Image (cartoon, rainbow, N blue to C red):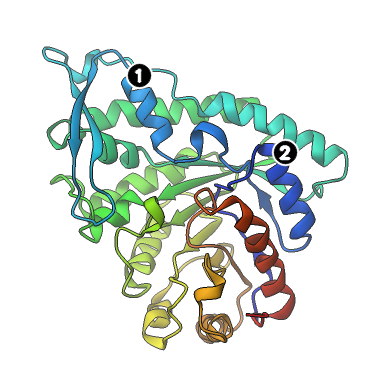
Amino acid sequence: MPPTTVHFNGGVNLPDTETVMREIAARVPAGVRRIPDGETGSRQNWIFFQLEKFWQTPGLEQAGVMDTPSEGYEQMPKVRLSDGVEPADVRWADLGYADVYQDSYATFRRLRDEGVIPSSVRFQVQYPTPLASINGWVVPEDQDRLEPSYESALFADLDRLLAALPPDEVAVQWDVAVEFAILEGGFEGTAAQTLDGIVERLVRCVDHVPDAVPVGLHLCYGDYQHQHFKQPESLDLQVRVSNAVVAASGRTVNWLAYTVPQNRSDAAFFEPLRDLNVSPETELYFALVPYHPAEQEPGTVDAQVQLVDSHLPSAEWGICTECGMARAERDDVPVLLDLHREIIATGGSRTP
């Protein structure tokens, strides 16, 4: 069947939360199950929001910059443990998500009560995985030493948020990007950051969310400086990670969002879907909404829809963009939102 639902991966380059929610509600009136706050303001550049928290944490100090193997991801700022400081001595700064999401929820609730947002739509929050910030911002020799306490601090921030929000109105997404960068050779990983180790970490993230709250994974290849750290050759790695996490988790993974480069409409890219083994309860979303529609060959979305549908003939599935829309040009955001609506309305066909 053609796609019937849409998913938003978090970031939306609009001025504020209310504008994000009003624009989504107005431009995509059908198929939306969760609505984000757009990660506006200081969260627009994803884990840069956490780098500021690292700089504020006593016991950590700036350590210059390091390049990654991926073109476009050079000069990444790093921190390290200060001389004489042990990991057990680090007391993390307030990581900031719980407070900002509570403010955004107040906007969500008001707009829902006004009838702008349908009553069936949940408020979606996004967290980077603990490994994202650890690998992204910490020098390699200190990553494994600092990760356990940072993971505990990030989980505590999520706990505080979920304690403040009604469980039947919220949903949690973990953004899984740095993990794919490590596995694809775009970022350097430590000896503990193997495929099995990454799956174990993602299972901890999923299982930390209470059963009453839907949880999903955004499987992402990054868009820093408008570039992936590597173009995925196929859906193979995303499918393997999905299968492993779903099999090992103690609860349902409610949705998975897959990266599909906008120029890939060949059968080989989608062939790994034959091996996808997830629960029928897990919603599946594919990035068939192109960031640059003018640069896409006419008919590409139709072909992508047919290829996904050929592997999921009896499943309900939906669409998304490759990453969030935080780094899209602001004037392009309405166009991208309209494309979500048009693709759903036409089953893939759209005006180029």
The residue pinned by badge 1 equals 92
Q: Secondary structure at mark 1?
A: loop
Quadrant of res 67: top left
Which quadrant, please, contains the N terminus?
bottom right
The kind of secondary structure element at disc 2 is helix
Asked if residue 132 is positioned above or below residue 336 in the image, the reply reads: above
Farthest right residue in view: 114
Q: Position of residue 179 (x, y in %)?
A: 31, 51
Image: 266 above or below 46: below
Q: Is residue 276 visible?
A: yes
Name the residue located 59 percent from the left edge and 63 percent from the top edge.
Answer: 281
Q: Which mark is residue 303?
A: none
Dot 2 surroundings within 10 Å: few (below 14), some, or many (20 or more)? Answer: some
Residue 178 in picture, x, y percent from top left:
32, 49
Label 1: how many Cα within 10 Å (few below 14, some 14–19, many 20+): some
Q: Amino acid at mark 1?
A: Trp
- Quarter placement of the C terminus: bottom right
| Residue 18 badge | 2
Q: Tell me the quarter of the picture where residue 136 sits.
A: top left
